[in-house]
Amino acid sequence: MVKGPGLYSDIGKRARDLLYKDYQSDHKFTLTTYTATGVAITSTGTKKGELLLADVSTKLTNKNITTDVKVDTNSNLLTTITVDEPAPGLKAIFSFRVPDQRSGKVELQYLHEYAGISTSLGLTANPIVNFSGVIGNSTLALGTDLSFDTASGNFTKCNAGLNFTNSDLIASLNVNDKADTLNASYYHIVSPLTNTAVGAELSHSFSSNENTLTIGTQHALDPLTSVKARVNNFGKANALIQHEWRPKSTVTISGEVDTSAIEKSAKLGLAVALKP
């Protein structure tokens, strides 16, 4: 693995994972099994209110080529082929969805000690071209994320980001939505022994002049059990507890309460993931 600034999607990722990852109000069950030839088969069922969604995916790895095929309840077939390091630091990803004939896309990622580049091109007559690039090192990184629609001749996405990483903290600043939204995030490791960390994200919309502040924390009760909590300035508080009851198999219970409308029922979510 090349040590460097990473990709644009890595800017602020630790704070986003702390504040948003694993929180949910649905009921989700995931089961992964492996065939004798090494093919991983994953079945997922999600209950959203009265709606039940399911999908089945297979993953086959042969040397440096990984093929993922997923089928969902709407009869959509998503195929992703990933070629890892056809050249040093390079990764190629080809994906398409059936029956959507315009969904084909080719993506190239390149990681260097002082740069990270990702570019993708839709396989259509008038494709959308995406480009993101980061320059810097493992301490300081500056990047941009652009999307250009060749059909309309307009930029559909124009973002920029700055990331600072120290031994125990990560701070990032992003300008998104064509300079309409400003996001600042902070992630601080309090205790590596107990995986205790705190984080915050402040988002400001210039068009609506609205601010959203979210703060959160995580802590490992023991090597197999962890808890997380977050709250925002609108009064919504979330908490979860996750337990690894066997290697790679977890159960997660999460809840949400609107403290500004306490008379409303709390939302509860359950996620169970089973792996051999």
Image (cartoon, rainbow, N blue to C red):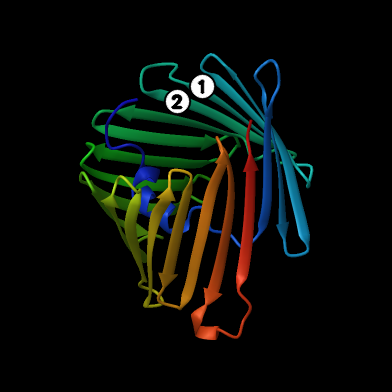
The three-letter amino acid code for the residue at tag 1 is: Val
Name of the residue lying farthest toward the front: 222
Near mark 1 (Cα within 10 A), the count class, few <14, some 14-19 or many ≥20, is: some
Q: Position of residue 49 (x, y in %)?
A: 73, 65
Three-letter amino acid code at the position of disc 2: Lys
Query: Where residue 160 sits in the image (x, y, percent)?
Result: 32, 52
Q: Is residue 67 left or right of residue 207?
A: right
Identify the residue at horizontal 39%, vertical 56% (top origin).
Answer: 218
Real-space Cα separation, disc 2 to disc 1, in angstroms:
6 Å
Q: Secondary structure at mark 1?
A: strand
Residue 87 spot, x, y in % from top left: 40, 16
Badge 2: few (under 14), some or many (20 or more) residues near its Cα, within 10 Å? some
| Residue 213: mark in rendering | none
Instruction: Point out the tag, 2 or 1, that comes first from the N-terminus.
Output: 1
Between residue 240 and residue 118, name the one nearer to us. Answer: 240
Q: Residue at x 69, y 47 (%)?
A: 29
Viewer can see residue 182 = no
Contact between marks 2 and 1 (CB within 8 A): the answer is yes
In front of the other: 204 or 38: 38
Task: From the image, tell me which residue sits under label 1.
Answer: 83
In the rendered view, would you say 156 is above or below 56? below
Q: Which residue is mark 2?
A: 91
The x and y percentages for residue 99 are 75, 39
Instruction: State left or right for residue 147 relative to residue 72.
Output: left
The quarter of the picture where the N terminus appears is top left
Q: Which image quadrant: the C terminus?
A: top right
Task: Name the residue located 62 percent from the left edge and 61 percent from the top edge.
Answer: 269
Left or right: 212, with 161 as reference point = right
